[in-house]
Amino acid sequence: MWQDPIVQDVRRAGEELAKQANYDLHIFFQNLRNNEKKESLKVVTILENEIASSKDGKCQITNCCNEQQAR
């Protein structure tokens, strides 16, 4: 059976993070949040009330950045 190397890498990384958290889900996600703060990366959160259905059934994001609205 063929195995995707990217999926294997993601699973390996997840296993390592779980091991670091002693397989405690609370600690696992707390570590992820702490890492996000350290990296200073912009995390995007889409709130449910910002998603609207269009006539063709595809989702549209409202209240988005100017670049997205220009599209």
Image (cartoon, rainbow, N blue to C red):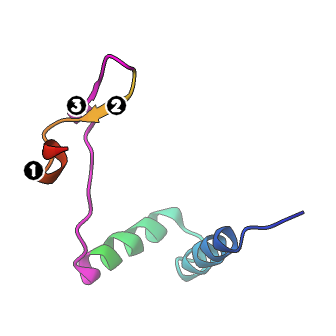
Q: CA distance from mark 2 to mark 3?
A: 12 Å
Between 71 and 30, the one lying in front of the other is 71
**Where is mark 1, residue-wise?**
66
Is residue 10 shown above or below 51? below
**Where is mark 3, residue-wise?**
49
Graded by Cα atoms within 10 Å as few (under 14), some (14 to 19) or many (20 or more), the crowding at tag 2 reads few
Q: Say what amino acid the circle numbered 1 marks.
A: Asn
Secondary structure found at label 1: helix
- Residue at 73%, 68% in the rendered image: 4
Is residue 43 shown above or below 53? below
Q: Are marks 2 and 1 in contact (CB under 8 Å)?
A: no
Between 13 and 68, the one lying in front of the other is 68
Q: Say what amino acid the circle numbered 3 marks.
A: Asn
Label 2 vs label 3, nearer the camera: 2
Residue 49 among those drawn in magenta: yes
Q: CA distance from mark 1 to mark 3?
A: 18 Å
Is residue 71 shown above or below 55? below
Residue 26 image point, x, y percent: 45, 63
Q: Which residues are magenta?
A: 37-56
Graded by Cα atoms within 10 Å as few (under 14), some (14 to 19) or many (20 or more), the crowding at tag 3 reads few
Label 1 vs label 3, nearer the camera: 1
**Where is mark 2, residue-wise?**
59
Which of the two discs, 2 and 3, labels the residue nearer the N terminus? 3
In the image, taking residue 1 as reference, residue 51 lies left or right, namely left
Residue 64 image point, x, y percent: 15, 45
Picture quadrant of residue 5? bottom right
Image quadrant occupied by the N terminus: bottom right
Residue 47: numbered disc:
none
